[in-house]
Amino acid sequence: MVNTLTPSRENRSAMTEPGTGGPTRRILLATTNPHKIVELRALLAGAPFTIGDPNDLGLDLDVEETGTTFAANATLKALAWAHAAGIVSLADDSGLEVDAMGGAPGVYSARWPAPGMPYPERFKVLVAALDGLPPERRSARYRCVIVVADPQRVLVTAEGTVEGRIALAPRGTGGFGYDPIFELPESGRTFGETPPAEKHQISHRARAVTAAVAALERLIAADPTAWPAADAAAPAT
């Protein structure tokens, strides 16, 4: 991990939501991916937490994803960011699993088939790999694992999936990653053609976030001390 900046006390307080009349439980989004930040903020908008991202703290961290599963990589990122920031952190690791390709690209989705390859070129490789296959053999899914951790331990792990298939060609400009090539049989649209509000109801990340928030609420209800005291900060005045 490189480029670590220690967040100042002033920056940490920027994540504290004023006017709530009680402690604010803070969560840092453990990513610098601007698309993920926007999507995660939208998905967590109704959750009982104050959400911050690395920009709020002046923090930049590059965590090497050496895990061989989504859960392992999400755990690496959540713990690294929580330790660097001193704040409970939420990380996700996600990718595309294509059945006809044995589940590939899977955990290597962000680097498949070569690191840094533009997504339009990846779409061409993917379509070529499935050339001639009928719709029923183009099945695929998006999988997302979310891990929430404090600097010492994992608090919650949650997973979400959405089933679909690989389209014959990319369609739509919405979303990010493989969204334009991932088609939902029920609607006949790709995620790239699906309005954000609708995508946020059914996506793999939406399902993982919903499960993670529910698990955190159960954890806090059963044992309020499970949340680090430093992160249950009094609201700023």
Image (spheres, grey):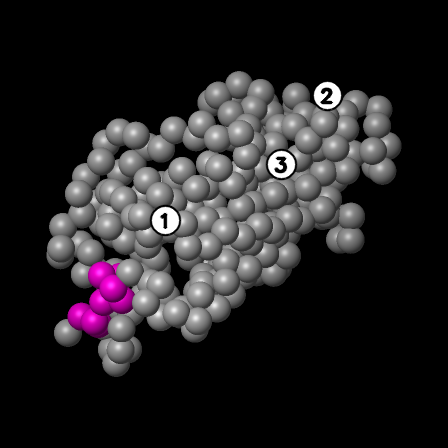
Instruction: Using the numbered discs, state the Cα–Cα distance from disc 3 to disc 1 in whole angstroms.
Output: 28 Å
The x, y position of residue 220, in whole percent, is 40, 69
The magenta-colored residue range is 229-236
Dot 1: what SS? loop
Circle 2 residue: 128
**For residue 46, above or below residue 183:** below
Check the picture and name the quadrant holding the N terminus. Answer: top left
Judge whether residue 18 can be spotted in this image: yes
- Residue under the image location 26 percent in, 29 percent down: 2
* Residue type (three-letter) at the residue carrying disc 2: Ala
Q: Is residue 97 left or right of residue 119?
A: right
Q: Nearer the viewer, residue 70 or 113?
A: 70
**Tag 3 secondary structure:** strand
Q: Dot 2, how many residues are within 10 Å of its Cα: few (below 14), some (14-19), or many (20+)?
A: few
Expressed as whole percent of the image width and height from the top left, the position of residue 225 reads 32, 67
Reading the image, the residue beneath label 1 is 153
